[in-house]
Image (cartoon, grey):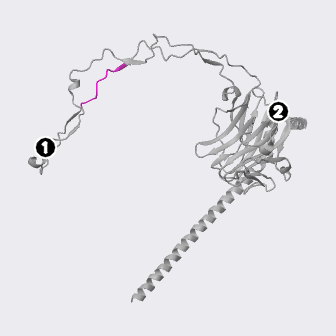
Amino acid sequence: MAAFTLLLQICVIFSASLHYILTDAHVFFEEKFDDRWENRWVKSDWKKSEGAAGDWLHTAGKWHGDPDDKGIQTHPDSRFFAISSEFPEFSNKDKNLVLQFSVKHEQDLDCGGGYIKLLSGDVDQQNFGGDTPYSIMFGPDICGYSTKKVHVILSYKGKNHPIEKDIPCETDQLTHVYTLIIKPDNTYSVLIDNVEKQTGSLYKDWKMLPAEKIKDPNAKKPEDWDDKEYIEDPEDKKPEGYDDIPAEITDPEATKPEDWDDEEDGEWKAPTIPNPEFKGPWKPKKIKNPAYKGKWKAPMIDNPDFEDDPEIYVFDKLKYVGMELWQVKAGSLFDNILVTDEVEYAKTFAEDTWGKNKEAEKNAFDEAQKKKEEESKKDDDDEDDEDSDDGHDSDKEDDEDSHDEL
């Protein structure tokens, strides 16, 4: 009984601690796209005058785990899409920055973006587009066979810096959750479906700061530096008669054709073939150079342009979230966008949205694919029947023609 009471107390304490962790999180932006979503978002007029601006549909998609769990989906094909929403301005100084969202490429995306942006300062939302400066761009990008990666582009002092590591993205037609975590210790993590796919240092995995060390631009290779690893063997001599070996010889298997006429065809000469004894121009063999000092490298020195920035992780005046995309085939569905400073809250949010519906969505997708295959097979069978009927009609016409001739 005492053990049970103790266990119950531990559970209560754990539950209370977890509740504190989750409720103490600062949620700067959270969007599940309910029926009032358009009141919070501004559709941009970018590319509208050119007739190339796309629209956004409020839908749960063709397959889903819950018909009421809707997002916004790009529509129609071959368009530019731009939309944004404003939230109270904040800075991530001295705290985590977590950007998370889900995206489903129902159209089996072959070329287009599926990423999201965080923007700072004042933005003209009505004209938000590809040239609008941003602080962070994060999410999948797919184009052909060569580009299937997760973008993590960070803006630093007015310049955009892509991550130096390659992070593969998901390429199927189901919903996936993408999470970017930037921490005050200048480290980061990228998660897909709540599973960490990449982690590291903001210093090492981006080129936001100049290199701390550089090659000495004034250093020069010493004149007596020997960097030839192999040299010709001075003791190696060309064998006598080497140059007398011909490159080709008369084919010993060749015989004069029986119908060859010297008067009409000229004097017969046997054809030549490559000489197996010929080894090409003679070259002395190579040996290790006893004076080899290795490949010369300029010594590294402190970079005079390097200036450390312990706050490289900080993004001030964060104020907007938006999607700005180009897609050849539309149909990407965005949902459950979150900006917070609490990692555990983001993980729980993902499980409470994507997590609880993923199995049902997968089953709905499988059922849709099965139905599609059955309809395709039925169409093929109908075409075969039509071809068969055409064949019978043709045979009948041939019989009638034969009858008329008789």
Dot 2 amino acid type: Lys
Where residue 292 appears, x then y in whole percent? 44, 14
Q: Residues within 10 Å of mark 2 (few under 14, many from 20)?
A: some
Residue bearing mark 1: 268
- As shown in the figure, which amino acid type bears the numbered disc 1? Trp
For image coordinates 53% across by 77% down, the residue present is 389
At which x and y percent is residue 224?
A: 45, 10
Q: Residue, x 23% and y 25% (percent of image)?
A: 243
| Image-based side of 173 in relation to 320, left or right | left
Q: Is residue 279 left or right of residue 287?
A: left
- Residues at discs 2 and 1 in contact (Cβ within 8 Å): no
Tell me the residue at 85%/53% (across/down).
35
Q: Residues within 10 Å of mark 1 (few under 14, many from 20)?
A: few
Per the picture, the main secondary structure of the magenta-coloured stretch is loop
> Which residue is drawn at the image coordinates 69% and 27% (left, top)?
208
User: Could you say whether the residue bearing mark 2 is in a helix, strand or loop?
Assistant: loop
Q: Is residue 282 magenta?
A: yes
The residue tagged 2 is 317
Quadrant, the N terminus: top right
On screen, 167 above or below 373?
above
Query: Is residue 381 inside the magenta stretch?
Result: no
Q: Nearer the viewer, residue 91 or 202?
A: 91
For the C terminus, give its image quadrant.
bottom left
> Of the residues under marks 2 and 1, which one precedes in the sequence?
1
Tell me, yes or no, if residue 86 can be seen here. yes
Residue range in magenta is 277-286
Tell me residue 195's x, y (percent).
Answer: 71, 39
Is 355 rendered above or below residue 63? above
Is residue 340 at least partly visible in the picture? no
